[in-house]
Image (spheres, rainbow, N blue to C red):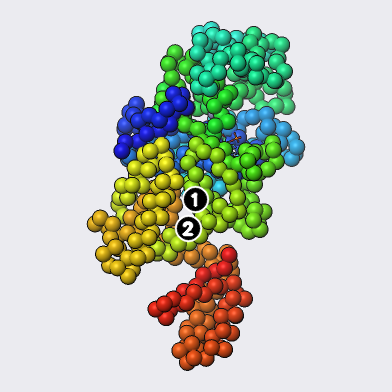
Amino acid sequence: MALQLYNTLTRRKEEFAPIDPSNVRMYVCGPTVYDLAHVGNARPLIVFDVLFRLLREIYGEKHVTYVRNITDVDDKINARAAERGISIRKLTEETNAIFQADAKALGCLEPSAQPRATEHIPAMIAMVEKLLASGHAYRADGHVLFDVASMPDYGRLSRRSLDEMLAGARVEVAPYKKNPMDFVLWKPSAPDEPGWESPWGRGRPGWHLECSAMSWKYLGEVFDIHGGGIDLVFPHHENEIAQSRCAFCRDVMANYWLHNGFLQVEGEKMSKSLGNFVTIHELLHSDTFGGRSWPGEVLRLAILRTHYRQPIDFTVKALEEAEQTLDRWYDEIGDVTAADEIAPNVRDALNDDLNTPAALGELHRLAHPAIAGKAMAGLTRFGQKPVPEVLKASANALGLLLQSGSDYRAERLSVANVDEAKVNRLISSRLQARAAKNWALSDRIRDELDAMGVALKDNKDGTTSWDVKR
Ligand code: AMP
Ligand code: ZN
């Protein structure tokens, strides 16, 4: 099956056809670096990383360009830096460093480029000049505004007419706007605010303009895929489209617009403003959520269990289940090297608009014959390949099982503070005690291990396996 993607622009699943298969181009709106990313923000990171991996698999690693910007000019940044009494640069550097570490812990590949808004001000100014020259923008009260009435199909992505937008708008409208929906391209900066010299005086860009300018610089006037969370459809993506299409006289900005659904807490979107958020950093490094810390891979699997367009409820139970699955799969793969191909059903599921729940179902099926295979030699192969190798390669396609089984286990033990050599010594003493039918000693050793946080499992073949207790 060829890759199909649901396009918000047409509200249909469409077969993906890149403009240039030797350079498939994707832009995803990145973080505004004033505060740490929360678990909801992890969703677009992970979802678009899966798509990046899939595109690399289909078109070749060198033939995909993935750009995720860093918004480091924003009024929220100015306010937060002032509140904390630190420079804007220190705040954005510090926040970005944690964001990069979070993304890595979630198993995300580095995008091909992560441009910063502050480094692309000349491109933004150039776009505003184009928009002014073509009559799509006007100057008012020190600002430059986009004139929405100048674009006949403004609202096409969100499918709203100007009249509907007006009816829905609750914000107080600046008196200098021709139309209440006109939005800022450039605004003046006070002396204590960050600003750049421009033909309209010292000022700074509007948020929407940043993405139009950076996608243009890195991907060209028209590119293949533009992504982000569903909340960005209006106004952010609508306005990016308006700016880019009008500046370059084009019918489209990007051919496929993809949007992930919300990660929710008790039915509500996780967000800073609702205060119902857990930061990725807290989840990974503290016991704020569920009384313990969680590996990034567990969050990744928990998120991929739901199709990217559906809402997800974020619960401790979902993390626990994801961790149990990873434990089992890592036991299955041990330290094998990934096969050079993935299971066709996993590939088909991903090609079907990134159907990760179906892909994970296939991984579960792959893990089963591998278990049985230890007893039944015929089942240890998948086609011409051993099953664990194919399981690993197929999971890798989703950015899962990237470590070796030994590293995964060692990490678990070190987090749980368990001395592996001591555990193995106690287990062999216990096996000797059992062989000598010294049940009292065997039970005492089991209790000792229990107190160390180790759970034993006596197997039918007389061996004992163990794991740290959760
Ligand atoms: P923001 O920092 O709010 O601009 O969000 C960064 C990215 O995370 C954007 O793509 C948002 O659409 C996305 N996002 C924010 N909150 C959530 C959420 N609760 N669930 C899924 N995606 C979200
Ligand atoms: Zn954007």
In the rendered view, tell whether residue 393 sits above or below residue 272: below
**Which label's residue is closer to the chain start, 2 or 1?**
1
In the rendered view, tell whether residue 374 sits above or below residue 57: below
Residue at image point 60% right, 80% down: 448
In the rendered view, tell whether residue 414 sits above or below residue 3: below
Q: Position of residue 71 (x, y in %)?
A: 58, 32
Dot 2 lies on which element? helix
Dot 1 lies on which element? helix
For ligand 1, the image quadrant comes to top right
Say whether marks 2 and 1 touch (CB < 8 Å): yes
Residue 301's tag is 1
Quadrant (top left, top right, bottom left, bottom right) of the N terminus: top left
Q: Position of residue 320 (x, y in %)?
A: 56, 57
Residue at image point 65% right, 24% down: 195
Name the residue type under label 2: Thr
Left or right, residue 312 beside residue 175: left
